[in-house]
Image (cartoon, rainbow, N blue to C red):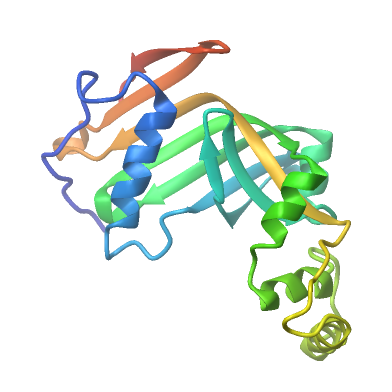
Amino acid sequence: MRRSYGEAGLSESAADKDPITQFQRWLKDAASNSFIVEANAMVLSTMSNSGPSSRTVLLKDVTNEGFTFFTNYSSRKAKEISHNSSVSLLFPWYPMERQVIISGNAAKISENASAEYFATRPWSSQIGAWASAQSSELDSRETLEARWKEFAEKYPEGSAVPKPPHWGGFLVTPSVIEFWQGRYSRLHDRLRYVKATPSNWKLQRIFP
């Protein structure tokens, strides 16, 4: 299986000096591409004593401070982050022959910020957060659905659903952000931003 990549490239002169601005530009491009289902879907990789693990999560916010996602704090990913905060994020925008890799450290956001976001979620998703003991063993699908029904009855649609204490957000503060653009003859463009100081980034071109 082999394909040829396009002529469109990524040059230092065209790239923004700020990688967050450059990311937001590419995210907007991906969101407007009809072949990309969820532009904000990213592969989150964490590390445990037994090795790395990866899964897809959704980016919910990006600011100058970093990249935010939400999850169950009892999940495997959250437990691994609590022991090793170094993580990697990968945005694989294949139809555009692009990807972005972010390396950084993850930390919990405030309870207030998590509660504010939780209140904006659809009711069914709020109930799902209560029903799922994420990453723990489940004996049957019926048990999961019974738990969902239990909490749906406790917090009927239209009522205010409180945020579960075990649910909230993580902010990934980036130290390295790499933009990859597929090019012909495998001569891909790779521009890497490395944080030199809290407010300055060093831009590097690296071999494909």
| Front-lying residue, 36 or 156 | 156
Q: Residue at 16% of width from left, 49% of height from top?
A: 4
Q: Is residue 168 left or right of residue 176?
A: right
Number of numbered tags placed on the structure image:
0
| Figure check: 201 above or below 31 | above
Horizontal and vertical percent for residue 152? 80, 84
Horizontal and vertical percent for residue 182? 24, 40
| Figure check: 37 above or below 89 | below
- Farthest residue to the top: give it: 197
| Figure check: 120 above or below 49 | below
Quarter of the figure with the N terminus: bottom left
- Farthest residue to the left: give it: 7
Horizontal and vertical percent for residue 171? 66, 38
| Front-lying residue, 20 or 97 | 20
Q: Residue at 81% of width from left, 91% of height from top?
A: 142
Horizontal and vertical percent for residue 201? 45, 14
Q: Residue at 33% of width from left, 35% of height from top?
A: 180
Q: Is residue 199 left or right of residue 97?
A: right
Quarter of the figure with the C terminus: top left
Q: Residue at 52% of width from left, 34% of height from top?
A: 63
Which image quadrant for residue 52? Answer: top right
Q: Is residue 188 left or right of residue 47?
A: left
| Figure check: 62 above or below 75 | above
Which image quadrant for residue 174? Answer: top right
